[in-house]
Image (cartoon, rainbow, N blue to C red):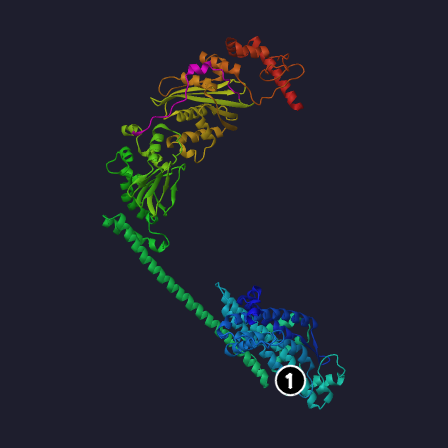
Amino acid sequence: MILENRRKVGPLMFMAAKWEGAFVLSCIAVSLDPLFLYIPIVDETNKCLKADNNLRTIALILRSLTDFLLMTHLIAQICHWVQTDYPKYSSSEHTEPSPHLDPEFDPDPEALNLVVKLVKHKLPWSIIIKFLAVLPVPQVAILVGFFRMRGTDFLINRKLLNVAVVLQYVPRVCQIYLTRHKFKMPGKWVKPSFNLFLYILASHVLGALWYYFAIERETSCWYKACKRTNNAGCANRAYHCGGSDITTNITLFLDQLCPINSPNSTLFDFGIFVKILQSGNTGSDKFATKFFYSLWWGLKNLSNFGTNLETSSYLWENCFAILICVIGLLLFLYLLGNAQLYIQSATQKSLDREKSRTRSIKKKKGDITNWMQKLLPDHDELRKRIKRDIREDKVVEKNLTQDVDVAYFFLKPRIRMPILEHLGVAALKKVPMLRDIMDDEDDTKLKKLCQLMEPVVYKPNSNVVRPGDPLHKMLFIIEGELKCNVPPMISIVKKNEYYGQDILEWALLNYTTRSYYDPVPSSTRFVDSGQANVEALGLDAWKLLHFIEENVDIDSPKLKALALPPRETDQMHTEDQLTLTVPWVAPDHGCVKLNCTSLWDPDSKMARLGGILRDDRGTLKGAASFCNQPCIDEFEAAAHSINKSNIEFYPQFVSSKIVVESDNELLVECLNNWAAPSKDRVRYSLQSTMENIISVASKFKSRTFVHCKRQTNAAALLLAEHADPTPGSSRTWTTADHKNHKIPEWLDSVLQTDMSHRTHQSIPQVRPHSGLFLGPPPPTTEENEGVLPLNKDMNTSSSTDPAHTTQDSGDGGNSRQDRGANLVKLFDLGLFFSWYRKR
């Protein structure tokens, strides 16, 4: 039956047995009990006692709630105690129940014997203390006994009541002590906060007792005064307000025999309670006022151990003062003990940390020695020098958590330098292609290159690279090995070998044949670190490429022999360009367009450049050609064509919107995205040219870089073809040259061709009822077939008769045809502005 009842206790009951919850409840319960001591109030006018009903209600509710929770915890602890101790004290031999017993009505003798054994052998003190703590002592003592005492045994009963009130705090305090050891207090400030809480809690309890004992001393004075005067009615009354035995004569002689405002020790000595009686707090129903006044009194006297208290000769008053002194000393000693324990604990932890740190430093130094003996076996002086530098820079002390590997020796520059000069240079020399192109006997360039290396460490079974991943680094293995999986074969990159030959070939190809470098190559295999750590020196692909660019002569015979052939060119013959009829696209209204191109010879590495600037009507604003510009490839040639044309035409048209058009798609993409990583892919020697293009173009009102087909760039291509072959020469033409017939016939011819086939974008047109419109002729459709523009003859002549156009342009507007054409243009312009205002 016990077992069955034991199993019925649910898990929620045991959850209530958490020691943390019990500790908090104990502290709350102790702080609530003194509220009952503030319930009595003295009516000095009628010399009677009354109760604070509001405070009584609040105190009863709060105390009942905490008692319920503590009782729940007590029941849970009892059930747990029965569960754990039952196997120890239950009988090993199970006896069958007697058939004469009725289990429904007769008690189980086995259960009774078990309970007797449990209580006799082991009854935890914590259960007894919790049981005593939940007894309703303050409810009965204050609310029932205090207000009803009367008769000849008044003083004796009052003393017993006072002892019960004080002793009921003993199990409460013991409960805090017991649960305190089960309660975990992590954190630096938790224990000091708990010590402060104990001081405040003790001050709260002592202040409430001081208030209660002051009222008790005054009622004792009333009782003795009545006994002294042999007033039987006065001595036997309960001093409770509202009684019929209160008379004016009684209150008068009680004022005389128990004076408070002018105390007389010969009549009655109130001792330490006279101040609170004189303050009027014992007769006030304002709880906050008397609470904080009593709390301050308790905290003050507890802090100075009650040395300022002036007691009377009353025994229990002196006992109360002694209690204050003892509690103050105990709390102070508890605080000192905790402080001492804290200091000892902190000192011990510091010593343990120092010992652990010393052991770690010793072990770390041993690992450093083993690593250098393994990788630098024949360099005793170098090892001594590195150890000295490590000791002077306190590398071990500052990096105790760092593993001793190749990355550990890169923490300080003066330790990294000698490691790289020996391990790095030795690793680079094992690359034949790299060793050949450097061509230095004293390894100066290799020492400079090895300073670009960075440590790389891979943990066991780590993926280094997968198929399709970009190869960012060459890896020179100094410890461990890499597994390269190319199904169905597996190759091993061992110690003192390297991985990433494709990166070197990529760098040489870009350096010899590219000015806008290709992206890094991609891996074609799985590479992992195997079962052990892999330590390597990594050389970044872009750093290697830029180092070769700065330190290797591009005309070196060995470099030319190693490099791959350049990529094919997409240039077309100029004759084919002129026969194609791809139209030149005019810019938007109010913009100018700069067309640039180049003719690059892969054999001589020289380029001829051409650029032409026109407005939205196709009018020539400037043209230029440049010859014998040394260039690595078409990308660099196209960049120089834009740069030189920009510089040539920038001062005159800086207030215009410009569209820069080139037939090199890579160049246009790079200019539109001039930032990393596109910027990093441009050769160092060309980056200043690219930045100058961006800078000059940004000075225009707006700028746009556009890619066009090479056929559309016929005028610029023809300028490049007819460039002056003299080295470093250039030729330019302006609008005035065009009007004065000073441009070559081949340039005038291609301009007329572009004018006849040009297309417009975003140019406003006007079609009034008179058939007049501004801008180029609209396409002939069924909708506008019968509409002829007023300046059709002029446009037709300018597009079909080049000679006539040249002559009209050369007169400068002096002929009659020019004046008529100008009038038509002015009329069209006025009509356009009238239409624009209406919109």
Residue 572 part of the magenta-drawn span: yes
Q: Which percent across, then down, holds residue 605? A: 35, 23
Residue at screen point 42% across, 34% down: 679
Q: Quadrant of the C terminus?
A: top right
Q: Quadrant of the N terminus?
A: bottom right
Q: Quadrant of residue 684?
A: top left
Q: Is residue 719 above or below residue 216?
A: above
- Report the amino acid beneath label 1: Asn
Pick the residue in front: 599 or 289. 599
Q: Quadrant of residue 816?
A: top right
Residue 574 falls within the magenta-colored stretch: yes
Residue 250: give x, y in percent of width and height. 73, 85
Res 778 quadrant in image: top right
The magenta segment is 562-586
Asked if residue 75 can be seen in this view, the reply is: yes
Q: What is the x, y in percent for residue 505? A: 33, 32
Residue 42, placed above or below residue 185: below
Residue annotated with mark 1: 157
